Image (cartoon, rainbow, N blue to C red):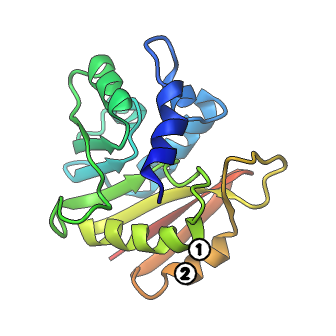
Amino acid sequence: MSKDRIRKHYEPLVGDDVPGFRAADWSDALAQQIRFAVLGDNVELTGRRLLDVGCGTGDLWAFLRDRDIATDYLGVDLVDKAIAEARRRHPDGRFETVDVFAPGGFPAESFDVVFCSGAFNLDVGNNREFLPVAIARLVELSRKVTAFNLLHARAASTYSHCFYWQPEEVRDMLAHFCGRVEIIDDYLMNDFTIICRK
């Protein structure tokens, strides 16, 4: 993973008057909300400790709060500017600049649920090598569920700076360290979610 490449891509997108979905490089707010709903509708979150990896400006926190889902939430991101904006927009949330993939950091099973929405979409040059390592780390951090979404290879239009996947390829990649793997790919043409349950 190239941290510099990630920061270079996302930092210019963050601004006081920029909607969160744009700062996260999503196409529109509705698509972002649909992706969040997949988590909220398929994973029990109430009363659980949730880590939101690649939280951007805190839109998932706002989504959960608006739905009255009471969870012990922590949002983390590599981009300092995004974390600062998340704290400004959502002073009731908890946000930190953290690289969860770096050595050290949070101990194993620090959270009940780990979610990662959109953080694997950027083509960083080694996506196929990095994804299984990254998901293994997220599964390690979770006591119960790890859920993440990826861009679908069936997308009608694609962007050169993004990386696209076949769901079956990802399922096979994760089979040896994820317990029960569920693929949800019926909500958007260009996206799918994988839920790993221990």
Q: Is residue 8 left or right of residue 188?
A: left
**Circle 2 SS class:** helix
In the picture of the structure, the residue carrying the numbered disc 2 is 173
| Picture residue at 47% right of the left edge, 74% below the top | 132
Number of labels in the image equals: 2
Give residue 65's position: percent from left, percent from top: 32, 30
Give residue 119's position: percent from left, percent from top: 49, 49
Above or below, comparing residue 141 to residue 162 in the picture: below
Above or below, comparing residue 121 to residue 14 in the picture: below
| Picture residue at 23% right of the left edge, 30% below the top | 93
Farthest residue to the front: give it: 4
Q: Residues within 10 Å of mark 1 (few under 14, many from 20)?
A: some
In the picture of the structure, the residue carrying the numbered disc 1 is 170
**Circle 1 SS class:** helix
Q: CA distance from mark 1 to mark 2?
A: 5 Å
Q: Is residue 88 left or right of residue 11?
A: left
| Picture residue at 54% right of the left edge, 30% below the top | 21
Residue contact at pointers 1 and 2, CB within 8 angstroms: yes
Q: Indicate the amino acid at tag 2.
A: Met
Disc marking residue 123: none
Give residue 165's position: percent from left, percent from top: 67, 65
Farthest residue to the top: give it: 17
Q: Is residue 35 left or right of residue 64?
A: right
The residue lying toward the viewer, choosing from 186 and 129, is 129
**Residue 56 found in image quarter:** top left
Above or below, comparing residue 25 to residue 159 in the picture: above
Give residue 89's position: percent from left, percent from top: 33, 18
Tell me if I can see residue 128 in this picture.
yes
Farthest residue to the right: give it: 156
Q: Residues within 10 Å of mark 2 (few under 14, many from 20)?
A: some
Q: Indicate the amino acid at tag 1.
A: Val
Above or below, comparing residue 191 to residue 146 in the picture: above
